[in-house]
Amino acid sequence: MSFENLFSYSAVQFEIVLSVFTLTAAVFAAVLVYSLATAKSIAPRYRLTSYLTGVVMVSATIELGLLALRWNSAFTWNGEEYTLTGGLFSNGFRYMNWSIDVPVLLTQLLIVGGITGLAFRKRWAAFVIAGIAMIWTGYVGQFDEIDGGGQFWLWGAISTVFYLWLLYVAWQTVRDAKETAPAGVKRLFSAVWILFLVSWTIYPLAYLMPQISATADGVVIRNLIYSFADIASKAVYGVLLAIIAQKLSAAEGFKPAIEAEKAFVEGEKDYVPAA
Ligand code: RET
């Protein structure tokens, strides 16, 4: 059972969690439109990244929308506070959503990183195996999050081993991508790596939250942390990869990318798009 079900919430605490769920779903819907609308200015060899961002955005919008509904129906206002009355709230949805999003996000890194052939297949297999194993072992552990017993720590530790493997392969991928990228894009790949490392490492912190602060405020903080991590690891990451893919496309001479780039170049205020 999720530790969210242990507490009653003040109006403010309840509202913050509900608003953050709704905000996150709205950000994902917006990035869905962005990624589909900009796909055409990205060369075919990288374009799949835009559609994969679309896949992540659809699944995450649905997940956050459902979490918001579930939160809203689990607790009711009794005149003083929100108490659990309408069935249990569950974070299990998140883990199911990650099962789709984690492999897809990692595939995007391989595509924009320009990894092909055997290296692509090997790393893709490593990513999928490590990613799914990390999530499902963590899923088993989180059922024990309230008492924080042996199961919680054991499965959490096993999950962390898979996470470290996944991080290593991601680091190799960014390193290889930087080697061949033009100068300006190298910096953006470094930014992707920092974004990746920070936003992904926040998830295990949220897993630990019931042991750090088993209070109603702890619940609010955990859900703020999750939403921050979700927006960074899915939405900001997807947009950043699209920007990199467009720059690489332009550097490789793909005309629609060059046109789109020109419109943003400083000093080209009088730029007139080609007919
Ligand atoms: C768990 C269990 C405890 C140990 C570790 C975990 C790592 C989770 C991560 C999740 C990333 C999710 C993403 C979702 C995007 O949709 C499972 C919490 C290490 C890294 C990026």
Image: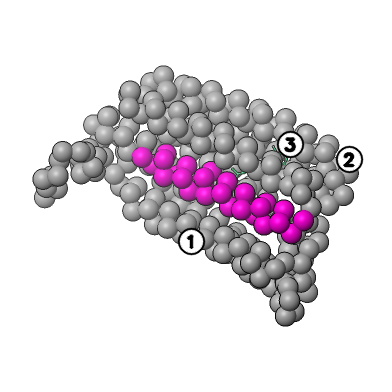
Residue bearing mark 2: 150
Q: Nearer the viewer, mark 2 or mark 3?
A: 2
**Looking at the image, is 80 positioned above or below residue 161?**
below
> Which three-letter amino acid code belongs to the residue tagged 3?
Ser
**Residue at 78% of width from left, 34% of height from top?**
157
Q: Residues within 10 Å of mark 1 (few under 14, many from 20)?
A: some
Distance from label 2 to label 3 (Cα)? Answer: 14 Å
Tag on residue 71?
A: none
**In-front residue for pair 126/76:** 76
Dot 3: what SS? Answer: helix
Q: Nearer the viewer, mark 3 or mark 1?
A: 1
Can you tell me whether the CB of the residue at mark 1 lies under 8 Å from the nearest atom of ligand 1?
no
Q: Main secondary structure of the magenta part?
A: helix
**Looking at the image, is 158 positioned above or below residue 271?**
above
Q: Is residue 268 left or right of residue 134?
A: left
Residue bearing mark 3: 159
Can you tell me whether the CB of the residue at mark 3 lies under 8 Å from the nearest atom of ligand 1?
yes
Residue bearing mark 1: 26
Indicate the position of residue 184 as horizontal and vertical percent values.
32, 27
Residue 29 in magenta stretch: no
Sequence-first tag of 3 and 1: 1
Q: Which residues are magenta?
A: 215-243
Image quarter of residue 167: top right
**Residue at 32% of width from left, 24% of height from top?**
182
Dot 1: what SS? Answer: helix
Indicate the position of residue 213 as horizontal and vertical percent values.
76, 49
**Residue at 62% of width from left, 31% of height from top?**
166
